């Protein structure tokens, strides 16, 4: 139910869905039409893509009507999804991700053990693009998709060398 509500209940997300019912669009086009900041639009689009409502191909977002129908049907049929790690991961990574992630991919609990924390940080790192620059607010918006402890996760990523930042914290980026 949480996935359904997250995907559909937000008015800004509904405006994006409404726009995409008319035609596929790039991030910049959506921002221009709605007058939103790109990081905010990206946040909403990520949620819609993650829930299968919107597809992304070559930088163009398109409404996935079958995905929207499937998501709503699943909620009314009472099906419960579970987080399923990718099959190409090794057994230990799959086990840790299954144990620490909710069905929607958010983090249930941040592990204390360094090896398990590293696996969760690797998972989070996929939300950041190599070479892109992020403000602290943008990093927090991305991390908030996964867990409310954005400052702790941000610090863990920086301490692990997975994200780098300017000394004053004005810019963050993912190195190679």
Image (cartoon, rainbow, N blue to C red):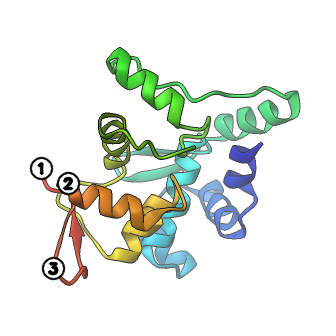
**Could you say which quadrant of the image residue 19 lies in?**
bottom right
Q: Viewed as shown, does residue 139 lie left or right of 4?
A: left
In the rendered structure, which disc, 1 or 2, sits on the residue that comes first in sequence? 2
Choose between 173 and 20: the one closer to the eye: 173
Residue 104 visible, this angle: yes
Nearest-to-viewer mark from 3 and 2: 3
In the rendered image, the quadrant that contains the N terminus is top right
Q: CA distance from mark 3 to mark 1?
A: 19 Å
**Could you say which quadrant of the image residue 117 lies in?**
top left
Q: Residue at x 47, y 46 (%)?
A: 110
Which secondary structure, mark 3? loop
Q: Residue at x 20, y 84 (%)?
A: 168
Q: Viewed as shown, does residue 67 lie left or right of 122?
A: right
Residue where numbered disc 3 is placed: 167
Residue 143 percent coordinates (x, y): 44, 59
Residue where numbered disc 2 is placed: 130
Q: Is residue 82 above or below residue 153?
A: above
Residue 78 percent coordinates (x, y): 85, 29
Hey, which residue is sitting farthest left in the picture? 176
Q: Are marks 1 and 2 in contact (CB under 8 Å)?
A: yes
């Amino acid at each position: 139910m949480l996935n359904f509500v997250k995907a559909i209940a937000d008015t800004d997300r509904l405006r994006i869905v409404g726009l995409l019912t008319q035609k596929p669009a790039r991030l910049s086009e959506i921002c221009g039409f709605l007058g939103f900041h790109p990081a905010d639009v990206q946040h909403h689009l990520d949620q819609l893509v993650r829930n299968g409502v919107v597809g992304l191909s070559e930088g163009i977002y398109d409404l996935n009507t079958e995905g929207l129908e499937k998501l709503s049907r699943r909620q009314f049929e009472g099906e419960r999804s579970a987080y399923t790690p990718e099959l190409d991961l090794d057994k230990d990574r799959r086990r840790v991700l299954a144990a620490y992630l909710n069905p929607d991919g958010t983090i249930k609990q941040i592990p204390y053990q360094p090896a398990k924390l590293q696996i969760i940080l690797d998972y989070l790192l996929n939300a950041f693009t190599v070479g892109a620059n992020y403000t602290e607010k943008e990093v927090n918006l991305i991390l908030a998709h996964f867990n409310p402890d954005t400052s702790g996760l941000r610090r863990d990523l920086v301490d692990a060398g997975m994200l780098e930042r300017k000394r004053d914290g004005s810019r963050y980026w993912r190195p190679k």
